[in-house]
């Protein structure tokens, strides 16, 4: 399935606007950030489009590298992304996974397993980090699990609202 990038980006922007936690520094919000987020979204979609049972581990590792890690230019080793990128990348990942899982029903189990494994790997990476800002993300609940739970709840509430509205319209007819 091909995804409408504009729709996904609009969903992502709405998530950022509605996020209750306002502790993200405004300095991280630059005009070029939209371009970075679009590129991140496209890369995540590209990686997830290759997901199968046979290449699950490779896809998992590619997502971990894409979402959680960045290359340390000093010694060409991978290290955890900056805190604001970690949070933003996780939000984008959740949006894309939920959008794909909604459309690609045959992959729901793989996407659920992927989310579980990504969260476990994220916790391992956080525990090994020496950056206090990154460790605070776990303490503050700014992690894949809480982002996923929050987004699922928001989408569920939207569906209930639409369903209730639809029933009220049918009853008035």
Image (cartoon, helix red, strand yellow):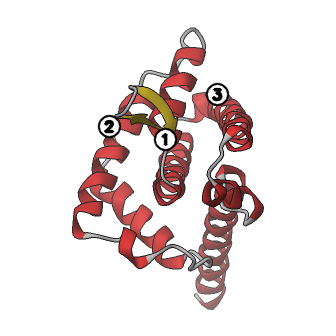
Q: Residue furthest front?
A: 74
Q: Quick check: marks 2 and 1 in contact, CB under 8 Å? A: no
Q: Position of residue 26 (x, y in %)?
A: 41, 78
Callout 1: few (<14), some (14-19), or many (20+) C-alpha neighbours within 10 Å? many
In 3D space, how far apart are the residues under numbered discs 1 and 3 (Cα atoms)? 18 Å
Q: Which residue is mark 1?
A: 67
Left or right, 2 with reference to 124? left
In space, the residues marked 3 and 2 are separated at their CA atoms by 18 Å
> Closer to us: mark 2 or mark 1?
1
Please tell me whether mark 2 sits on a helix, a strand or a loop.
loop
Nearer to me, 87 or 25:
25
Q: Camera-side residue: 58 or 80?
A: 80
User: What is the x, y in percent for residue 143?
Assistant: 66, 54
Q: Is residue 1 visible?
A: no
Q: Would residue 25 be visible to someone looking at this image? A: yes
Find disc 2 in the rendering and name its residue: 2
Give the residue at x 62% y 54%. 134
- In the rendered structure, the answer to whether residue 123 lies left or right of residue 10 reads right
> Up-down: is 162 above or below 45?
below
Point out the tag, 2 or 1, that comes first from the N-terminus.
Answer: 2
């Amino acid at each position: 399935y091909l995804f409408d990038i504009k729709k996904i980006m609009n969903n992502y922007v709405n998530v950022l606007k509605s996020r209750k936690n306002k502790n993200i520094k405004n300095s991280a919000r630059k005009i070029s950030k939209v371009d970075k987020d679009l590129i991140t979204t496209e890369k995540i979609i590209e990686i997830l489009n290759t997901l199968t049972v046979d290449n699950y581990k490779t896809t998992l590792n590619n997502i971990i590298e894409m979402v959680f890690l960045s290359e340390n230019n000093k010694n060409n080793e991978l290290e955890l992304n900056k805190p604001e990128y970690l949070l933003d990348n996780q939000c984008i990942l959740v949006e894309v996974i939920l959008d794909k899982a909604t459309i690609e029903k045959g992959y729901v189990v793989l996407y659920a397993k992927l989310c579980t494994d990504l969260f476990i790997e994220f916790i391992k990476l956080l525990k090994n980090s020496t950056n206090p800002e990154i460790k605070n993300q776990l303490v503050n609940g700014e992690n894949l699990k809480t982002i996923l739970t929050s987004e699922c709840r928001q989408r569920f509430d939207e569906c209930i609202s639409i369903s209730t509205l639809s029933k009220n319209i049918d009853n008035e007819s």
